[in-house]
Image (spheres, coloured by chain):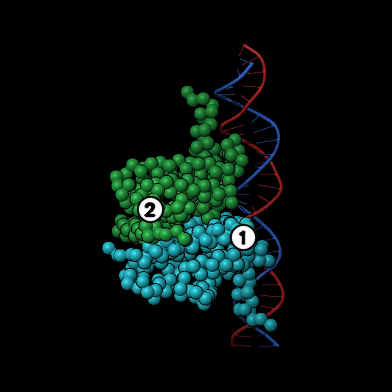
Chain colours: A cyan, B green, C red, D blue
Amino acid sequence: MLSREEKKSLTRQSLIDAALSIVGAGSNFASVSLREVAKNAGLVPTSFYRHFTDMEELGLNVVDDLGLVLRKMMRAARQKDGYKKGLLHSSIEVYVDFVCQHKSHFYFMSQCRTGGTPVLRQAIRNELKYFENELSSDIRSVPFLSEMSSQDREMMSQLIVSTVFDATIDILDLSDSSANYQNEFIESMKKKLRMIWLGGSVWRSK
Amino acid sequence: MLSREEKKSLTRQSLIDAALSIVGAGSNFASVSLREVAKNAGLVPTSFYRHFTDMEELGLNVVDDLGLVLRKMMRAARQKDGYKKGLLHSSIEVYVDFVCQHKSHFYFMSQCRTGGTPVLRQAIRNELKYFENELSSDIRSVPFLSEMSSQDREMMSQLIVSTVFDATIDILDLSDSSANYQNEFIESMKKKLRMIWLGGSVWRSK
DNA sequence: AATAATAGTCAACACTTGTACTCTGAGTTT
DNA sequence: AAACTCAGAGTACAAGTGTTGACTATTATT
């Protein structure tokens, strides 16, 4: 038997999942109602308040959920063969994989980064910042980039991260189309990242 | 005196403006109601239907409106001193200028690119495509980039355009903060574009 | 001058929304 | 075993939602 606390956090998660599934089905989080979420989680509307004060607070918890997914992704990318040599090359594949396997999370992220409330936008931004930092530290150990200043390395990481995450909505929209289109897109992404990489390798801060 | 047609297109525009002003005030277009727009335009809800069948159709017309702004911007960028030498350098300044002077339009664009209905997303994408093509043709006449294949030039343009437009929401959020932060951001943007530029100049398609 | 077209109004509908209040039954603490 | 806590249900309400249909006054057409 489950304790009261355990049961609570279970329904709490079911509210989060409900919101994600609604977003994944095509709605914009900004227009998802508290009632809809509650209904979808098998709850009466008023029970929503036992867990969150409003939809924004639920949104912040969805961001936390998203954070877990992103960290798992980072680990997967680092473990993958060829991460050291061909860092970006292999990362983009891991990224596409994760987007396709966590569509709801990434729809939510894409939407909220530009269309969420200011608080929500900031929360998403913080998640991206985590990535920029991780990437920046990984880049540090790349031979011909190690002479870059930490500021420039940070800037370069921002550029790469924003390029990858900016492609999210396109990846999602493409996920239902032919494998041909998908591969074409991935190849184009790789080229873009390689161009940035090249730019970084001849970079001279000034 | 105005003809009936003229008057109609005037109130039509007032509906578009109303929607934009609501978005500019912080709402997400996806959650803006038909009634709210009508009210804001000084109309009774049912009159909305004389102009648009639903909010999505109005949205498409907002995109057209946005298109005009973007084209005006392109012209402004090309006329600016130093466009030929330091293309990106000067363009980013024009861009920031336009974003700040047409906040509502750019909030709308940022939101809808990732959070609009599929139809709306596609419409926004088409507007960006216009830019990519224009930039690609401008790049063609740059000496050390002219040997690039048209495909690679296209790819590079996509990279640049997405980098610039991806920064929109940050520019908007920064527009209320100190000039110091703004300048810092612009300088960072310039560096990013320079890195791409560098990458392009040592690019060897393969 | 008579007729037709139509932008905008008005009233009304069925439905959804967030939220306040009360109640209950199963877990927890004493 | 008694007292307490509290997640979730039930009821209710005022406000907002999209949409329908009939009406009106002004403009355009004949």
Alpha-carbon span between mark 1 and mark 2: 32 Å
Residue A112 to residue B38: above or below: below
Can residue A16 be seen here? The reply is yes
Residue B71 to residue A75: above or below: above
Task: Say which residue label 2 marks.
Answer: B145
User: Three-letter amino acid code at disc 2?
Assistant: Leu
Name which residue lies at 51% across and 29% down: B7
How far from the left and from the top, in percent, is residue A38? 64, 64
B69 or D27, nearer to the observer: B69
Residue A185 to residue A94: above or below: above
Q: Report whether A137 appears left or right of B50.
A: left
Name which residue lies at 39% across and 55% down: B171
Name which residue lies at 33% across and 47% down: B83
How far from the left and from the top, in percent, is residue B6? 51, 29
Secondary structure at badge 2 equals helix
**Residue A179 badge:** 1
